[in-house]
Amino acid sequence: MTYDKLRRRERSQPAQKMANVHRGKLLTLALIVLLSVSDVACGHRTSSREQLEANGKDVGDDPATSVRREKVKDAMLHAWTSYEKYAWGFDQLQPQTMNGVDSFGGLGVTIVDALDTLFIMGLDEQFKRARDWVATSLNFNKNYNASVFETTIRMVGGLVSGYDLSGDKVFLEKATDIADRLLPAWNTPSGINYNSINLVTGHAHNYPSANGNSILAEVGTTQLEFIALSQRTNQPKYQEKVEKVIEVLHKNFPADGLLPVYINPRTGKPSPSFITFGALGDSFYEYLLKVWIQGNKTQAVNVYRKMWETSVSGLQSLVRKSTPSGYAYICEKNRNTLINQMNELACFASGMLALGSSGFDPQKAQMILSLAEEIGKTCYNFYQITNTKLAGEDYLFTAGKDMSADSLYNLMRPETVESLFYLWRFTGNKMYQDWGWDIFKAFEKNSRLETGYVGLTNVNTGAKDNLMQSFFLAETLKYLYLLFSPTSVIPLDEWVFNTEAHPLKIVSR
Ligand code: DMJ
């Protein structure tokens, strides 16, 4: 697929709304484009004509929404241009000091993380420069202990997504190179991978801070990327390694579907630790659902859905309501004690529940979607109660006082706008677009500098840090852009987002 084709399809939306008489023709055009997307990106068609037709039936677009979309695109252009100017080839930009920093071993992470956002937004020249850098300068031969999780979600995910969108084989070659370097991390007695690996020597180990254990969210968040790579290369070795992890976790899966955050890589069993949908636990639960979606919900991936549904019951058992206002939140759990605390990171769960709700019977689906909406409202409130209207990292819930920010920094994380995107897609309620717009305005006011975007060290005073996180370009701005785009741009029955917001083509298993 070329970018132009995708754009032509999107540009057709306002016209579609204004002149219904052209609807048939536009749908035909969309169908032709979508069919060519499947052909080029994955070498075969993955969607039926009926599905494609359904995708063409759009929620629609309006002038105010397209203005918002353009503003988000401007923000992306500003973030990208600043990175190009001051930090080209480095992992991330430090906007205040106007230099680059290699936070991930010098893999040009911002370039790869931003690839698909540039493509989707139609920033063609920028995409071309990013693509050429990948082809000529991306070098994984670094004597560096890389995080298997971060390297997978940003690099493998970003490259495979770049391939799925553009059909350019250079992305697949590079994804294969880095995946091969990561693969020895799975050579453990249980098959549960180590969390860190040297990209040259292949020596793998776990972090001392986790007492030698592997981290749940890190071992359970490589499946989408490695399965996608196996599908596109016809090499089963990637898929085999990551699915073995789920097999082992399945053997030790508790009745409530909630695993502690530490897993012993020797035995494959959980080690005493806490339970959370926030940091260290989060995306394990997300990937149970998304591998099922990625495999097109067939029998071959049913075990993932079953495990996910079990973990949703566990999640429901952790939900409490604040007083006096009744905000729903997800507690953490230490042994049998609930802790009235929720990370902003756990806000992804609202979108996850919305995405997975339709697989239940109609009554339960409605109940799960309502829960998703309630949690989404809480997360929006995380933003609204601070002076800058940007969320802190962590919130405490106290009887009679609702919630208060505990860690006051903001890294421009995506989880809340990600969930608003899913809530809008699944309910059609424009209130979620308005909420996303409020959050975008707060980023523009507090995080935008002449030289890029920065996080805040304090969401009440507005004090700034000196880092433009690559996930701001990969995720936060992409989800905001899609929140203001027609639903046919990256339709959710054809694409599934990895945890770094890289869309991967759904391929039946
Ligand atoms: C991203 O790297 C991913 O979204 C991950 O799942 C969680 N942390 C950051 C964003 O907050």
Image: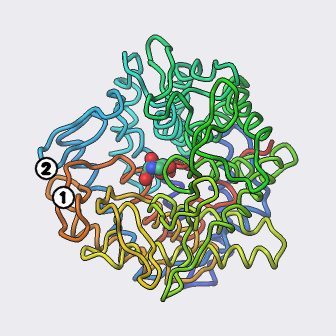
Residue type indicated by callout 1: Lys
Q: Which residue is mark 1?
A: 464
Q: Which residue is mark 2?
A: 96
Q: Nearer the viewer, residue 133 or 479?
A: 479
Q: Is residue 419 left or right of residue 265?
A: left
Point out residue 232 in the picture as x, y percentages from the top left corner: 67, 32
Q: Residue furthest top?
A: 201
**Residue 353 is drawn in which quadrant?**
bottom right
**Residue 333 is drawn in which quadrant?**
bottom right
Q: Nearer the viewer, residue 305 or 89?
A: 305
Residue type indicated by callout 2: Gln
Q: Residue furthest right?
A: 299
Quick one: label 1 or label 2, which is nearer the N terminus? 2
Q: Residues within 10 Å of mark 1 (few under 14, many from 20)?
A: some
Residue at image point 81% right, 79% down: 363
Q: Vertical placement of 159 versus 61: above or below?
A: above
Point out residue 101 in the picture as x, y percentages from the top left corner: 24, 35
Q: Vertical placement of 383 versus 400: above or below?
A: above
Tag 1, which secondary structure? loop
Q: Is residue 196 visible?
A: yes
